[in-house]
Amino acid sequence: SPLHNLLTALPKCEHHVHLEGTLSPSLLFALAAKNNIPLPPSAPTPESESFDPAFTSPSALSARYTTFSSLDDFLHYYYIGFRVLLSPSDFEALTYAYLSHAARSANLRHAEVFFDPQGHTARGVPLEHVITGFHAAAARAQSEFGITAELIPCLLRHFSVEAGTECFDSLISTGGFADGRLKGVGLCSTELDKPPEAWKGIFARAKGRGIRRTAHAGEEGPAGYVRAAVEMLDVMRVDHGVRAAEDNAVMQMLADKGVMLTVCPMSNVALKGARSIGEVPVRRFLDAGVRFSLNSDDPAYFGGYIQENYCAVEEAFGLSVEEWGGIARNAVEGSWCSEERKGVLL
Ligand code: ES4
Ligand code: ZN
């Protein structure tokens, strides 16, 4: 595309990337070996009935990642990957690999990165290991590349609200919301039959403490879940939100309130929410005045980082230079960094 050089040089902000979703198959196998973590057997064994040939090698695992059938099919592999992450240095290596790659290859200037606290504490890995490892890498990447990075814990919908409450309490106990090491709170994982309303109490407590809020909604779930995330959880951003395009009233509400959708086009195609990038409602959002940013979600699993997502959208929609400028500006304005930092990014 004639815009390729412009899209590479464009200063970018990413708001929707899961730290654990940046774990490449090669780093997964390397950390499993270093930490002595058994992966699922790749062939039948006497002790275990369940085996998965995808765990033969990093390349076999990569190949399996091209055939996800749904969000839940992906999440099965994603949560196996968590097992290899143990020490602060593992989280530091993971974070640094992502930030340095995105800063160098995509001119990423600011990243707001999700992680799943319950996916780690459930294995006995303390929250502090994730938080200190992340911020050690973020400080190094900032000094080397000038990139800024923030960390946002997400509560997991496949666990109970009671478990979410306990997790939220332990996040508060880290002091991370008060000292800025945690920039807000999110909600993710499996969506179907998990309407946002159930999380209302926790999100109200977050609001009461001045904690910023976002939630995955309208990825596999209906447009009504996007409305519920905004109206019941009082989120300032909605992660994905693409199914809002099926309901004009929800689109109007998003435009009126200026709620930003953190859209992840390659993720939607990889998980079969869309048959092609062209089916992701980018043009609908532009025409309806619904603000959105473009993001990678789980780049190690979905075939591309933020650069590839920008290029895929350009290939499918052929946006104008002005439209790309607007997308990049909205991404800065929808960020949760300081006003001073926004001024530098704009
Ligand atoms: C996720 Cl693509 C997606 N959707 C919901 N939850 C997630 N966690 C990590 N990736
Ligand atoms: Zn996500």
Image (cartoon, grey):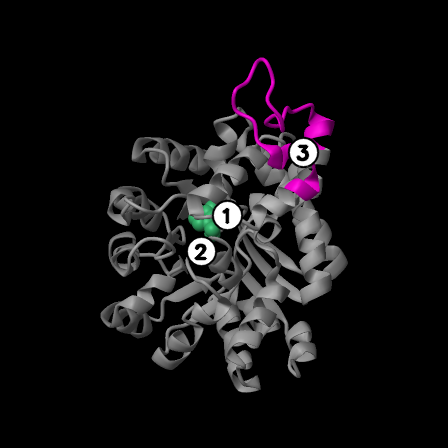
For the residues labelled 1 and 2, say whether their Cβ atoms are less than 8 Å apart. yes
Q: Amino acid at mark 1?
A: Phe
Residue stretch in magenta: 31-60
Mark identifier at residue 272: 2
> Residue 24 sits in which quadrant?
top right
Q: Residue under circle 3?
A: 56
How far from the left and from the top, in percent, is residue 194? 29, 44
Q: Is residue 206 above or below residue 83?
A: below
Q: Three-letter amino acid code at disc 3?
A: Thr
| Residue at the extreme right | 144
Seen at 40% across and 71% down, the residue is 281
Q: Is residue 41 above or below residue 346?
A: above
Q: Residues within 10 Å of mark 1 (few under 14, many from 20)?
A: some
Residue designated by label 1? 68
Residue toward you, 257 or 195: 195
Upstream in sequence: badge 3 or badge 2: 3
Direction from residue 226 to residue 279 in the image, left or right? right
Q: In percent of the image, x 61 and y 56: which residue is there? A: 303
